[in-house]
Amino acid sequence: MNKQQKEEYLRGYGVMKSQGKPFFPYAIAKDSAMACIVMVVIILMAVFLGAELGPKADPTTTTYTPRPEWYFFFLFELLRIIKPPALVPLATIGIPTICMILLFLLPFYDRGPERRPERRPIATTAGIFTIAAMGYLTYLGATAAPPTTIDVPVPKNVTAQGAAAVATYKAGQQVVAQSGCGACHRFGEAGNAGPGPELTKVGARLPAAAIQRTLLNPTAPMPSFAGLQQTSPQQFNDMVMFLSSLR
Amino acid sequence: MAKIKVPAPPVPDQLKPKPKRPGKTYGPQTPVEHGAEAGASTVGWIDERTSLSGGARWMMFRKVPKGTNWFYTLGSATMFAFLSQAVTGVFLAMYYDPAPKGAYESIRHINDDVFLGELVHGMHKWGSSVMVVLIFLHMGRTFFFGAYKYPRELNWVIGVVLLILTMTMSFTGYLLPFDQRSYWASIVGVNINGTGPLVGPYLNDFLRAGPYFGATTLSRFYSIHMLLVPGAIAALMGFHLYLVARLGTTAPPWLKPKTAEALREEEVAA
Ligand code: HEM
């Protein structure tokens, strides 16, 4: 807006304001009605949905589901949609950061005098697109529950080693399933495809020592399993054994 | 409407107010009269010392353009949701214990034993969702109405900061019940945060109070959640509202101001 447009706007706005009604009681009445609705909605939600607690937090446990509050789903889903590891920092940080900067600076790059949504096609389209994208990602996040069981057929190399190896394999498979790894990794038919890489054949790519190192010292956002190794090394070793025999 | 005169009840002479003598000072004389004036004189006393009434009048009796509709209530609804969070949060804080050993049990205690505990806990929990929904709706309203344009640019920028702070509130609050879900989700969330450019790792050390999730992490999240961020939100909300009153709320974009000429013609026609 140039100087003339600014003055024109202020003049026009001044006229409309002087023809308006006082804030008290007219606007206050609407605001109060809305406040009552908000209060009723919050109380109804509290009464009908409650405030349940899950099991107590246990840093060494193996049963958890790392799910954020629903309105963070869209951020989490960004991780899942962008797969190549090289692009992951872009998804986690790049896109949100760029969006935040665009949001902050909006009044400084969109300086046209027009205010009607139907006469600002670019802004309106971008707004609707953003809402649709966030809605879609939230929907994806809401429907992507992690699996509680993983069922990868026992590989031949394990069967060849005898019954003890098969038992370890099964035990490890259960630990992995209960640890919620499937929230971010895919194992055969089970689990979500991302943000973590597919693990169906991870044993062919990485030796056991490397898998163990990753579990203890993972790249973000994966949580570390060092706590599990300290409290129940047996389970931890089963896990490593299961993963390294996936090929 | 004609005034109806109610006949005065018979009052014994001793109790009848004495007529004022000429030359006496103005204002209430008897204790009863003082009592009747108490409200007005308290306000007057405060105003004499603070001059707040001018500000209140400026805030309450400013004009709002014609055509302001229900979409314009979303901002104040967001503020109301925040106030509800503040009040329920105060009551939760009376019972909450921000230590890894006691946090979960104290929330259990709130849910199971405290009078109306589960209701207040539920209101705080679901109120956060309501506030997030409302803040996005309010932002959408200001966006589609072009309300971020001159002269309200700064109010938009403050709004974006409020949005980030609100999301920070949910993020730090999610850990506090200290159940499995909140614990592991917070670890993953903090890890994601740590991949941020430049400040990411430092921010993480600050959030966790060290390089790992430890015993002090919970109390740090708690103090951020109930002191640091709400304080900042309250202050910025005040500034946001000051600017709204200072600049006036936008008129709906499809309304055009009547020019002075059109007004005059209207007057002539009337
Ligand atoms: C804690 C959150 C917030 C509160 C309590 C709040 C409160 C308010 C209130 C009460 C108004 C008066 C008009 C109305 O209600 O529509 C307003 C106006 C405004 N808000 Fe917010 N707001 C918040 C967040 C935001 C956000 C996230 C944005 C945008 C990024 C924003 C941008 C604006 C703008 C541009 C106006 C001026 C609108 C106009 O004059 O028509 N606000 N806000």
Image: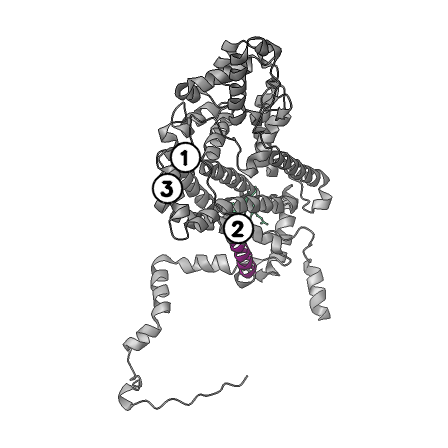
Residue at 61% x, 29% y is A78
Q: Quadrant of the N terminus of chain B?
A: bottom right
- Tell which of A200 and B251 is nearer to you: A200
Q: Chain of mark 3?
A: B
Spot occupied by residue B39 in the image (x, y as percentages of width and height)? 36, 68
Please provide the residue range marked out in magenta. A27-40
Please, what secondary structure does the residue beneath circle 3 have? Answer: helix
Question: Do the residues at discs 1 and 2 belong to one chain?
Answer: no
A188 to the left or right of B3: right
Q: Chain of mark 1?
A: B
Label 1 vs label 3: CA separation?
A: 16 Å
Any mark on residue A48, and which? 2
Q: Which residue is mark 1?
A: B221
Badge 2: how crowded within 10 Å, few (<14), some, or many (20+)? Answer: few
For residue A69, above or below residue A244: below
- Tell which of B61 and A240 is nearer to you: A240
Any mark on residue B135, and which? none
